[in-house]
Image (cartoon, helix red, strand yellow):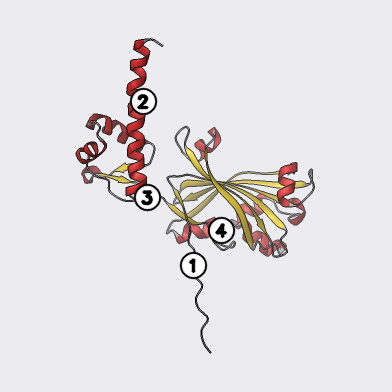
Amino acid sequence: MTELSESKRRPRKAYLAARQALLNLLNTEFSEGDQIPAERELSVLLGISRMTLRKITDELVTGGILERRGNQGTWLTETTIERPLTQAIEHGISKITELNGAVPGSRLIYFQEAQASSRIAALLKIQAGDPLVMIKRLRLADGEPFCLETSYLPRAIIPELTAEMLEQNGSLYRLLAENYGVLGVSDEGTLRVTIMNEEEQALLNAQPNSPALVYRGVIADRFHQPVEYLVSVNHPQRVTFRISHGTPRPAQQV
């Protein structure tokens, strides 16, 4: 490596280190919706020049992590939707959106027939090759996309379900309950961070190489029979997952 190429690498490495230092500070010392310190204070705190800090801040504003409010300063962006990790199954996305004070919306990306792969079949406790319905929907809050959900359902439990029925009703879980007597009562899955693919970035209006909070779970009925495998890709600047653990109340004396 030549001295020239080495000199080019050093400023970039220092810039990335400064960017990470700012992100670490924001993630540990502040909460969403908080105003961050003024540029002069932050540059002294992080030991970097104001020019470098301004460049990093511009990048984070473009990425939706920070927002400027005129002459009022710079703030950590507030997420649009707070989703509880432990929720009643019947509280679908539309209900959760309403509870966040936003108007729910949905756009059907596709509704198609498929055959279960060995992996999906194992999750749904059906045979590989059995017919499935695959439903992909873009979920909106006040017209802004925040989540992309793909549902895999055994065709056997919803023999007459069509895309038109879903679009007219709006709620998949309500359709399952009212038309087919299918009630999901338990939900078990995982949450992890991945990088969005190009389709997800386009649909969620996200920057290239944006991270996503991805939930993958199986919804089962009261007989422990899986009725849906769900993959939910959530925009990290628009969705927060909330965890709450309650302490059982002591039994009252009678």
The residue that disc 1 covers is 246
Measured in 3D between alpha carbons, the distance from the residue under mark 1 to the one under mark 4, in whole angstroms, is 21 Å
Q: Which mark is residue 12?
A: none
Q: Which mark is residue 78?
A: 3
Picture quadrant of residue 3: top left
Mark nearer the N terminus (1 vs 2):
2
Position in image of residue 213 (x %, y %): 51, 45
- Label 2 vs label 4, nearer the camera: 2
Q: Which mark is residue 92?
A: 4
Mark nearer the N terminus (1 vs 3):
3
Q: Please give the name of the residue rendered at 60% of the width and 57% of the height, measured from the top-left corner.
A: 171
Measured in 3D between alpha carbons, the distance from the residue under mark 4 to the one under mark 3, in whole angstroms, is 22 Å
Quadrant including the N terminus? top left
Q: Please give the name of the residue rendered at 74% of the width and 54% of the height, measured from the top-left corner.
A: 160
Measured in 3D between alpha carbons, the distance from the residue under mark 2 to the one under mark 4, in whole angstroms, is 44 Å
Q: Please give the name of the residue rendered at 30% of the width and 46% of the height, measured from the top-left corner.
A: 75
Is the residue 154 above or below the residue 20 in the image?
Answer: below
The residue that disc 2 covers is 13
Mark nearer the N terminus (1 vs 4):
4
User: Label 1 neighbourhood size at 10 Å, few (<14), some (14-19), many (20+)?
Assistant: few
Residue 115 visible in image: no
